[in-house]
Amino acid sequence: MTVAFFSLRSRLLSAATASPPEDKGLEPIPRKDEDPDGLKLVLDKDPLERADKCLAGLVELVPKNMEVCFATYDVAVRRSERNLAAWSHEDMSNLATEKYLQAVKMLIRARSLDPEHPDLHVRIAHLRNTGKINPSLTPLVDDSW
């Protein structure tokens, strides 16, 4: 019995004083932040496109978040307004309408989550006003809201 105790004790002591195990690549290596001050993001040529890409991932990961719905709505509306202001060509108008469809989709999702949210009502009023200004959006904006 005492021999087993001493051999167990010696194994525990040797394990405690042994060097740490080698890294076998199980833990991810922390990546170096190439832009710690965020200057690349600030100086980006098209921040709305970048925001749209980031929000597309968030919409998939967190589909039941009101803030993600509102942020996606805001970015989609700004992108479509920019496209309408920059071009009067038919293709750009279709692209702008596509972005308004994305905005309406986010409002519908937000409405299904919380129909009484005050920010939702602000954005619905904004969409109605935009539909009055841009006649191509009248099918998207009706009185059912």
Image: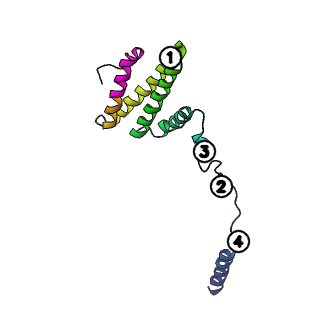
Q: Name the residue under label 4.
A: 19
Chain-order first, disc 1 or disc 3: 3
- Dot 2 amino acid type: Leu
Q: Name the residue under label 3.
A: 39
Which segment did they paint magenta?
125-140
Q: Name the residue under label 1.
A: 94
Alpha carbons under labels 3 and 4: distance apart: 42 Å
Q: Tell me if residue 140 can be seen.
A: no
On screen, residue 70 above or below 104 = below
Mark 1, mark 3: which one is toward the viewer? 3
Q: Based on the displayed image, in which of its 4 quarters is residue 137 positioned?
A: top left
Judging from the image, what secondary structure is the residue with disc 1 in?
helix
Chain-order first, disc 3 or disc 2: 2
Judging from the image, what secondary structure is the residue with disc 2 in?
loop
Chain-order first, disc 2 or disc 4: 4
Q: Name the residue under label 2.
A: 26
Task: Tell whether 47 sits left or right of 75.
Answer: right
Q: Where is residue 108 in the image (x, y as percent from the top left)?
A: 37, 29
Chain-order first, disc 3 or disc 4: 4
Q: In which quarter of the image is the C terminus?
A: top left
Judging from the image, what secondary structure is the residue with disc 4 in?
loop
Residue drawn at (64%, 77%), measured in percent from left and top?
Answer: 12
- Dot 3 amino acid type: Leu
